[in-house]
Image (spheres, helix red, strand yellow):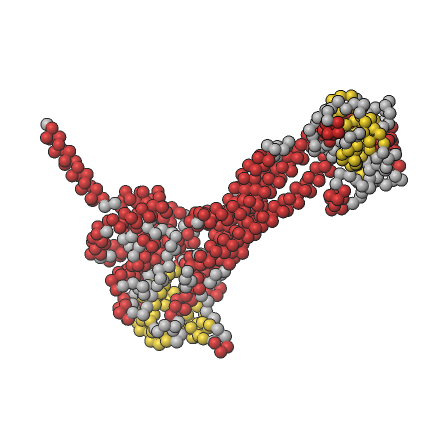
Amino acid sequence: MSEQRGETIIQLSGVSKRYGFGDSEYFALRDFDLTVKRGEFIMVMGPSGCGKTTLLNIIGLLDKATMGEYVLGGKSVERISSRKQAKFRARQIGFIFQSFNLIPTLPVIENVSLPLVYAGFGKLRRLRMASNILDHFHLQEREYYMPWQLSGGQQQRVAIARSLVANPSIILADEPTGNLDSRSSHIVMEELRDIHLMGNTIIMVTHNPALTTYATRVINMLDGEIDTDIKTVADWDLPKPGDPEKISVRILPKKREAKEAAEEVKAPEKEKAIVEVAKEDEKKVVVKKVAKSAPKKAVEKKSASVKAKSKGKKVGVK
Amino acid sequence: MSFLLRTHIKLATSSLRLNRGRTFLTALGISIGVASIVLILSLAGGINRLISTQIERVGSDLIVVRPSTAKDMVGSIVDELTASNQYLKSNLSLSDVGAIQRLEGVAAAAPIAVMDGTVSTNNKSMNATLVATNPDLEKILSLPMKTGQFLNSQLKENTAVVGYWTAMQLYGSVEAVTKTFEYMGEKFMVVGVLEEINDPINFNNVDFDNAILANAGFMETLGALQIQQVNVRATTTGGVGTVVDEIGEKMSDSRGGGRNFAVLSGSQISHPAGSLFTIVSGMLTLVASISLVVGGVGVMNIMLVSVSERTREIGIRKAVGASSGNILLTFLFESLILSILGGVMGFAVGYACAFLVSLLTPFAPFVSWEILGITGGTSLVVGVLFGIYPAVKAASKNPIQSLKYYR
C-alpha cells in the first residue's frame, strides 16, 4: 500500500452551512476549517445543535455546504458529479448511524452487502465479501437473520460491518453508541478501535466523554465552530494501513468469543423460534443454516451416545 | 451495468413479493383494462376475419361499387356512423347499374338498396327489410333457394323473394310461393323463399334471412332508391383489374369527370363493413382504455405509498452509495413489473372471456401477435407513465431527511 502516513484526505476550508433565510437564518456550521489526516480517529463533541451531524453529512457527501471549499482526496467536491459522489460514498465512505439504519426487509447479509451493490460488485462476490466481514464480527451464524431478530449491539455491529464491507478509507460514525448500553457500546468501540488500527480514518460524533480515550484527536464544537481541537497522537504515530485480517484476528479478544458462545447455548429455544420465523423469508438458505448453526456439538454428542448404546446392545446380543 | 440492472429487477421483485396481496390487487387493476382491450380486439378481429372469408368464398372475381365522397377519414367515419348501412344520399343510380351491365367483361351486376318498411298480408303486418335488387344477384352471391325461384326478368315486376325467417314470420311456413303481401300500397307476389343462410354479418350489410328481395326497377317507382352498393362479377378472374378501371371510367364519364364513388375488389371490399366494426371496436377500446388509466392511477398510488413507506430505506441506500438514478430505476422497475404482471393476467383473462363469448356467437376470437404486442406495449407504457412520477419522487428525496424519517 502506497498511502503515506499522515496524508491529508479531508480538507474543509471556510465551510458554512446555513439554514433558513433572513430573520430565521441560522448557521449550523460557520466558517469551519478542518484538516483530517489518514489514520486519524477523531471524536467530535459538543452540545446538541452545534453542527456535529451537519459536519458529518457534509464530509460524507450527503449534504452540500452553503459556502466554502471541501477537498476530498485532493479533489474539490464541487467538481464531482452527483453520480460520482454516490460512487464515492459506496467505495470510500462508510456510514454508521445512531439508529443503526439497517433495512428491515433485508436479511443481515444483504444489508451488509448493500454498499457493494452500488460499488458494482457481482452477487456472488458481494455475498462472499459480506460473509467474510460478518465472520470478523462473529455474526456469520446470523447472516440470514432479519435485523429485528438481533439485539441492539448486534445490529450496530452489523451496521459497522456494512460500513466496512467495501473497504472504505473514511468511516463516519454518528453517535454509534447512542442507543446502546455501556457493555454493548464498549464492544462497538472496540470494533471501531480495531478498524482504526487497521489504518482507517474515523470521524465519530459522540456525547460520551468517556469514549474519547479511543480517539487520536478530540474536537469540541460550539455553535458551528471549533471550540477546542486536541491531538493526543502525533501524525507520524497514526496507524498505517496493514493487513486487516491479521490485525483483527490478533486484536479481537478470545474472551468475547467464549462469552457469546455461552449466550447462544443459554437460549437455544429462542433461536429455534427465530430460525422458524426466518424460514419464511429465506427458506432454502435457512435450511442450510439450520444444519450448520444447530448446536453441532450436541448433535455429535447425541450420535456418539447412540453409537455407544448400539454397540452395547450388540455386545449384549453376542 | 447489466448486472446492476438485474439487481434492480431483483430488488423490485423482492419488494413486490413482500406485499403479495397489494401487488396482486394493483396488477388486477391493470389486468381488467388489458383484459377488456384484448376481448374487444380479439372479437373485432374475429368479425373482420369472418367477412374476409366470406369474400373469399364468393370469389375473387367480385367487384363492388360503392358511393363515396371525396371526404377525409373522419368525415367518412361520421357518415358511416350516422347513416349506418343506408347511404341516405347515395349517388349511384339504376342507370349506372345498366351501364356497368353493358360493359365488356362484366358477367353480372346487381344493385343493393335496403329500405325498412311495413309489410302486411291479409291478417298480419310487420316491419321488414326490403332489398331492391335485380335477378343478377343470384349469379353473384349464389343464394340457395328453399322453394320456388329467384327473381327473374321473365316474371312480373311485382314479384319478390323472401328470406327464410321473414317467410316464417309472415306466413308461418316456408311454403310461401304464390302468397302475397302489400308494401306501400302495392301488392307483391312471393316467387321463392331463400334457404336459411345464418350469415348476419357480410359485406352486403344485409341479413338475407330477414329480408325481402324485390326488383329494383319496380321499387324505384315507389320512391327514390338509395343504392348502397352495386355488386359486379367479372367474366374472368384475370380481367378484374381492367373491369375495375373500365367501370371507373364509364361512371366517371357519366358524371362529367367526377368521382363520387369507389370501385373495390378483393380485400378492399371487406373494408367498409369491416371499418365500421373497426371504428366501433376502436371506440370500445377507447372506453376500455379508461379502465386502463384507472388501473394505472392505482399503480401510481401504490407506488407513492411504497415510496413513502420506504423513505428511510431510500435514505439508507443513498447513504451507502446509491445514486438518484439507481433509486429511480429500482422504483421504475417495480411499477413496470406491476403493470406487466397485470398485462399478462389481463391477456389471459381477456382471451378466456373472448372464448366464452365465442360460444354464443358465430365468430371465433382472433389470436394474433398484433394484439399481444398492443397489450404488451400498453402495459409497458402504463407502467412507465404512471411509475415515473413516484420513481422521480423517490429519487429526489433528500438523504438526510429520509434518514430521519419515522414511520
Q: Nearer the viewer, residue A125 or A159?
A: A159
Q: Quadrant of the N terminus of chain A?
A: bottom left
Q: Foreground residue, B134 or A195?
A: B134
Image spot of residue A128 (x, y percent): 34, 48
Which x, y percent locates residue B109?
82, 29
Q: Looking at the image, which residue is at 58% across and 34% down?
A: B355
Q: At x 44% / y 74%, what residue is drawn?
A: A27
**Place of residue A100 in the rendered image (x, y in percent of width and height, measured from the top left):** 35, 60
In the image shown, does A301 or A193 lie closer to the viewer?
A: A301
Is residue A117 placed above or below A303 in the rendered structure?
below
The number of callouts visible is 0
B51 or B265: nearer the viewer: B51
Q: Quadrant of the C terminus of chain A?
A: top left
Q: Which residue is depicted at the point 63% across and 44% down?
A: B285
Residue A223 in view: yes
Left or right of A82: which side holds B176? right
> Left of A196 or right of it: where is B253?
right
From the viewer's perspective, is A241 left or right of B225? left
| Residue at 38% from the left image edge and 46% from the top image edge | A124
Which quarter of the picture shows residue A14? bottom left
- Asked if one can make out residue B10 in the rendered structure from this viewpoint, the answer is no
Q: Which of the 4 quarters of the picture holds residue B112?
A: top right
Of all residues, the one furthest to the front in this rendering is B123
A44 w.r.t. B390: above or below:
below
In percent of width and height, residue B307 lies at 47, 56
